[in-house]
Image: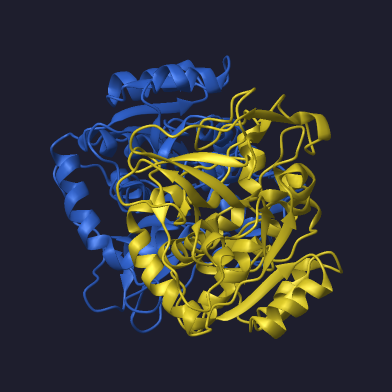
Chain colours: A yellow, B blue
Amino acid sequence: MRNSNRQWRLKRRPVGDVKAGDLELVDAPKPVPGKGEMLVRNVYLSLDPTNRIWMSDMEQYMPPVAIGDVMRGGTLGVVEQSNADGFAVGDIVIPGMGGWQDYSIGSASGPFPAQKLPKIPGVPLSTFMSALGFTGATAYFGLLDLGKPQAGETVVVSAAAGAVGQIVGQIAKIKGCRVVGLAGSDDKCRYVVKELGFDACINYRQGDLVSALKRECPKGIDVDFENAGGEILDAVLANINLKARIVVCGLISQYNATGPVPGPYNFANILMKRARVEGFIIIDYVPRFGEFAMQMAQWVMEGKVKDRVDIHDGLENAVTTLANLFTGGNTGKLLVRVSAEP
Amino acid sequence: MRNSNRQWRLKRRPVGDVKAGDLELVDAPKPVPGKGEMLVRNVYLSLDPTNRIWMSDMEQYMPPVAIGDVMRGGTLGVVEQSNADGFAVGDIVIPGMGGWQDYSIGSASGPFPAQKLPKIPGVPLSTFMSALGFTGATAYFGLLDLGKPQAGETVVVSAAAGAVGQIVGQIAKIKGCRVVGLAGSDDKCRYVVKELGFDACINYRQGDLVSALKRECPKGIDVDFENAGGEILDAVLANINLKARIVVCGLISQYNATGPVPGPYNFANILMKRARVEGFIIIDYVPRFGEFAMQMAQWVMEGKVKDRVDIHDGLENAVTTLANLFTGGNTGKLLVRVSAEP
């Protein structure tokens, strides 16, 4: 057991790719829980594209992380000390926004209350950071609430082998759609087709994407679950059907940009095809997480939704591990193992 | 009465601005109505930004006008000969897609059946090409069905003094919104504020539009009725509220472009603000025109919706008149008077 608390603090706002000196790892005292609080040893830290947004001062959906503050991030951990009713030592919890650190203070109340996780036989803890966590909820509500896929329609998913994309495609299959993934390598494409049951997957780094989409979506695109933006979104827009729904979940292609990024050149197709483009941030759906959790747990237990997690050891490696999201280095949900599972 | 029928035919697809030789005015025989048809002398020809789309071979919502064909356009006219039940000589009709010509053949059936217009005391014929025509319906359904403005919200309208924009702003005022127009001259701004009751209007050609919008929309933008695109849309996106609705009715800023046009640089704000961008073409709403006609006729008769029409004489001037839409030369609905009102 550690006596100090290592913390990744934001030292300066990154320009372009996140660089070694943009964050610094400092030793802080191990925090002490107050009344109604608990001390949580973080086990898994979630790494997400949105981390890059929080490091910047671009227009965003939450305040950016302040310079000098602990980097914001979702964690899963084990309670080591508890002054909070209903939480006991050894409980597995999501302690609110745990942050990029060894220990967090969870609270039984407040805006991000700690959430105790159930034990589901055969379901690893990491699944609560993936299919059964915010990642799965993002896929679930984004696809179903905004994408509204109908049986027989064609759904395209960018970053298909990524944390959210892998779940989106499987839900769309459950709903009876033709599902075409876009991913950055043949291995990733094999993964989503062979292991997850996508109908097709296009390696967007090879050949002309507009014609590849035309080939794999012979009836056109009805729903696009957009994680990428940029040229990928443009190629999708060139192939949309009348009344297509484009769910903008992420625009990872531009988070590292150092200057203004143009929107899609095929923007006019939104008009011509009477398409709907809708932005989506999962925090708006927290009040409906119960609905999601019931359904997704069932799908996971039935084996209808699988998820791959890509676990990297060591909080000290968080910054270099994050880079995988932007280089295409990871398949599935990217996690840092901060400490051993209990 | 003419014995021939002058027709503007598309000679070649314009590159950039429409030029004199892109269309040619030819003399054709006066058409003869068949069974169930009528001969219509066109009185007014509607000039609309979408005319430029139809001349091009860009991705669009109807087939483009074929080279050699009569230019497509909406008209209002008077029946001179009728073989169609329910239509008599002297009736005022919208003869389907009348086209850029002196005479059209209307049909009582088919995909674009002729529509007989009622006589409403005090309402000029030209209003049926403006507030009470496709133009008004575009404003009505686009704003209400997609924009869904709520009392107290802020609605921005680009091309505010244009055919559709002038109607949009007045409907938004009826719905209890703060209405801010964007127009290309101080005269146009005065028109929409003083004569139509908009709360404010910004001359987008002067000063920084982002900060002007911030000033005139102190509570942010909830609904944007977008007719322009380009830098105007970008400035709007910089000022949108959470869950803003952007109704994409037109993108006139780019119809004359000769190369690929980037989408809005603030595209990511659609994500951050969970905004909805939706394309809209009025032809989808034809089945609901009854609802629109009843309501708009009431507003027009009550003086709650006014419309200015900008009438230019002579079919021979149609091409040069059309240019006004792209140079900002017109205020209100742009019409060509093809022949005298009966």
Taking A263 as reference, is B143 left or right? left
Q: Give the residue displayed 51% in from the left and 75% down from the top.
A: A171
Residue B290 spot, x, y in % from top left: 22, 62
Q: Give the residue displayed 56% in from the left and 69% down from the top.
A: A168
Residue A180 spot, x, y in % from top left: 65, 76
Q: Nearer the viewer, residue A221 or B160?
A: A221
Q: Give the residue displayed 57% in from the left and 41% down from the top.
A: A103
Q: Nearer the viewer, residue A247 or A341?
A: A341
Taking B20 as reference, is B318 left or right? left
Rendered position, A161 above or below A219: above
Rendered position, A311 above or below A221: above
Is residue A231 among the parts visible in the rendering? yes
Residue sitting farthest toward the right? A206
If the image is split into quadrants, where does the N terminus of chain B sit? bottom left
Rendered position, A76 above or below A290: above
Q: Give the residue displayed 43% in from the left and 68% down from the top.
A: A144
Is residue B101 among the parts visible in the rendering? no
Residue B112 spot, x, y in % from top left: 39, 71
Count the marks: 0
Residue B89 spot, x, y in % from top left: 26, 66
Quarter residue A102 falls in:
top right
Quarter residue B38 falls in:
bottom left
Q: Nearer the viewer, residue B43 or B242?
A: B242
Taking A119 as reference, is A126 left or right? right
Quarter residue A260 falls in:
top right
